[in-house]
């Protein structure tokens, strides 16, 4: 059951959805992208930590199963509605003021590239309160600072409940920073997104 009625209205009014996670988040995010309503009408950006220079089947699996168009982000590409975007490995993903993607090769953040923090902070400055961001299971603190910045701009910020997460470090870091407006189980998150 959802925490309150206001959360659904804010999700509906959001113009973009951010999904961030690391260890233990893949299955949850995979479930979400398989079940999205085809009339979602907002872009979805996924930032998942992956091993450097390690070939991954994530993109192929997501592309085959996604309910709406799915693609890996390209530099200078325009952000489009009703599309699921995956942050590529070995780059940080940012969004420019003109709502195009920018890929950055600067140093890893929390040993991670792509960094969830980098993307969340970038999106906060462009979309402000017109954003929903969800931080899932993970084994480090990446995403917590970015989620806090989003919350400070009025975005809807959600963290997977640590008791429900395979790896608790990422959700706990966000909760400790007071970056999470809502702490929800995976089932509650699926209900919110109408999956």
Image (cartoon, rainbow, N blue to C red):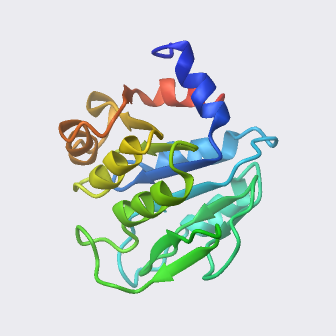
15 and 107: which one is in front? 15
What number of labels is visible?
0
Residue at screen point 64% across, 81% down: 76
| Residue 9 image point, x, y percent | 62, 24
Residue 115 or residue 16, whichever sits in front:
16
Residue ID at (34%, 55%):
146
**Quarter of the image holding residue 114?**
bottom left
Most foreground residue, 13 or 171: 13
Q: Residue furthest right?
A: 39
Q: Is residue 27 left or right of residue 140?
A: right
Establish if 2 lies above or below 62. Answer: above
Outermost residue to the left: 176
On the image, the x and y values in percent for residue 65 come to 70, 53
Image side of residue 71 versus residue 106, left or right:
right
**Horizontal side of residue 64 vs 147, given as left or right:** right
Quadrant showing the C terminus: top right
Query: Residue drawn 23% across and 41% down?
Result: 168
Whether residue 136 appears in this view of the structure is: no
Q: Quadrant of residue 163?
A: top left
Image: 167 above or below 175? below
Residue 151, x across and y down, in percent: 38, 41
> Is residue 161 something one can see in this rendering?
yes
Query: Residue at image x 71%, y 53%?
Result: 66
Image side of residue 104 versus residue 145, left or right? right
Whether 15 is drawn above or below 12: the answer is below
Q: Measured from the top left, where is residue 45 in percent x and y?
A: 57, 58
């Amino acid at each position: 059951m959802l925490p309150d009625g206001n959360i659904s209205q804010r999700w509906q009014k959001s113009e973009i959805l951010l999904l961030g996670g690391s260890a233990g988040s893949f299955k949850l995010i995979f479930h979400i992208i398989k079940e999205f309503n085809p009339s979602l009408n907002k872009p979805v950006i996924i930032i998942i930590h992956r091993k450097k220079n390690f070939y991954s089947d994530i993109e192929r699996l997501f592309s085959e199963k996604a309910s709406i168009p799915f693609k890996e982000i390209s530099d200078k590409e325009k952000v489009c509605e009703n599309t699921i975007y995956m942050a590529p490995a070995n780059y940080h993903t940012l969004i420019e003021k003109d709502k195009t993607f920018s890929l950055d090769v600067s140093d890893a953040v929390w040993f991670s590239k792509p960094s969830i923090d980098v993307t969340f902070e970038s999106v906060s400055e462009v979309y402000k309160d017109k954003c929903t961001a969800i931080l899932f299971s993970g084994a480090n603190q990446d995403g917590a600072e970015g989620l806090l910045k989003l919350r400070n701009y009025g975005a809807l910020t959600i963290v997977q409940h640590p008791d429900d997460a395979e790896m608790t470090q990422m959700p706990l870091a966000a909760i400790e920073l007071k970056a999470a407006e809502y702490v929800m189980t995976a089932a509650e998150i699926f209900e919110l997104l109408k999956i």
